[in-house]
Image (tube, helix red, strand yellow):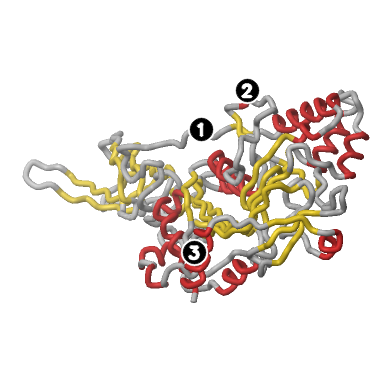
Amino acid sequence: MTPRLFLWLLALGQMGAVLSCRVGTLEECQKASFVPGHNLAGEGFDIVKLQHKGAYVIDLQTFLDPSDSCTLCENTLHRDELQKLPLSVLDWRSFTSCRQELSSALLNTVTSVADSATDLIENDWTVGLGLGDLADLTVGGSHSNAVEFATAAYTMDKSVFTSHQLSCSHYSYRVSGNPPLSSEFRAQVRSLPQEYNPSTRHLYQRFISTYGTHYIQQVELGGRLKRLTSIRTCLASVNNHSATKVKDCLNTGLSVGLGFLEPSATTSQCRSLLENQDSQTGSQLSYLNHITEVLGGEKWLGEVSLFKNDSMAFRRWLTSLKDAPDIVSYSLFPLHELVPDPVVGGNVKTAVNQYLRENAIAKDKAPQQCFGQPNLSSDCCPLQPMRGRLRTHWIKSEDNPRWNSVYDLGHVEAFHELKLEVWDKDVKYDDHLGTCRTRLQEGTHTMSCALSKGGFSYSYTLTCDPQLSGYQCAKYRPAPQ
């Protein structure tokens, strides 16, 4: 059932755009419904938060021209129903473009997460804003949900991220170059003062809070599913899972859940990984956490099993996208370009510029790399637990002689005991005076050892490999970035 559904969708996608529009009479225009998603362009947009503001800049409700007629178009995805366009909408198309596979990416830094979050934007949103000196900062999406999630993961532990997404597109259109403005936006613009200074700045900040930094000029409508996963890099590593393997196994698991692959496609190694349990250090931490974003369609959280076909809700969501689409890609233009008064428009540009600078974040430095170090991967994570460096600092006897020896035992498997033997060297036979054993514990420790005659004391230091700690270096220790 599922493969047929997607073959059908793909076939429609290959048909390309279909457009059949005509002028409608007053009676036809009043009776007809708007095309799906007719008011999704022309909305204010905050590039910092990647947030649709829900406040309309452009008038997308007026559909009658001065001659009391309108444009009616056949919606081939809605039983060829004639539907009307707002006056400000141009180049409306209905089509279907769906893919029956996920696209995936490995994102090594918060900066790359921000870049990925802005990949729905089709044009250069910085044009006209004078931000050329911010090359070393991240502005777009700097406070988006995805970046906030990634930043929180970074503050808890060393992390990388994977993105898995798919989209279906059904409609596209743009708004005219000199569109009619919404009455509320015109009123808000007229209320702004001619002067922009510390005493009036709050009024412009309130304006940005309402309308954002840009407006949406062109859209492609349909639905999108995106899952962003944070990977505790070193906890995954010590469980023998690389970030690339996590990405690929998640791709397989999600494809199984969405009905693209049979459950038998999941290897036993991937199944173990997707169980998301630390089997090596006994910590209660999960090495995978995720957020899911679903755009368009009927309410669906986007969560599916990674081990079995769980695609019923997904298929319903796909079908609902034709009637309830959302924006899956868009072009943004600076908001100040729509302000009729050039002085106020310049003030809006200045206020937006300041807002963007205040919310920019520094780009991440290149991740640390390790090469040729025992038990460390190239990204400086332990490959196995219970490993560290062992040194004995001094050994002294309660009887003659007195020793002050230092032994650097190098990199060791910390689950072994430290064993010390004392022998009396004689001319003919050496006498074994005693043996002491101790289990290793992270840190510096002083121990005493009783012999058949007398005794001795010694001190050792066990330095666990990065992000390992405790008894025998067996515990996992998070490393906030």
Q: Residue furthest left?
A: 428
Tag 2 or tag 3, which sits nearer the N-term? 3
Q: In which quarter of the image is the C terminus?
A: top right
Position in image of residue 6 (x %, y %): 50, 67
Three-letter amino acid code at disc 3? Answer: Ala
Residue labelled with disc 1: 365
Q: Distance between the residues labelled 2 and 1?
A: 18 Å
Q: Nearer the viewer, residue 72 or 143?
A: 72
- Residue at image point 40% right, 51% down: 244
Residue labelled with disc 3: 11
Residue labelled with disc 2: 133
Which one is in front in this view, the residue at disc 1 or the one at disc 3? 3
Residue 305 is left or right of residue 60, and the answer is left
- Residue at image point 36% right, 54% down: 439
Marks counted in the figure total 3
- Residue at image point 53% right, 54% down: 229
Tag 3 or tag 1, which sits nearer the N-term? 3
Above or below, 37 against 50 in this view is below
Q: How far apart are marks 1 and 3 (CA)?
A: 45 Å
Three-letter amino acid code at disc 2? Answer: Asp
Q: How far apart are marks 3 and 2 (CA)?
A: 47 Å
Three-letter amino acid code at disc 1? Answer: Lys
Which of the labelled discs sits on residue 200, or is there none? Answer: none
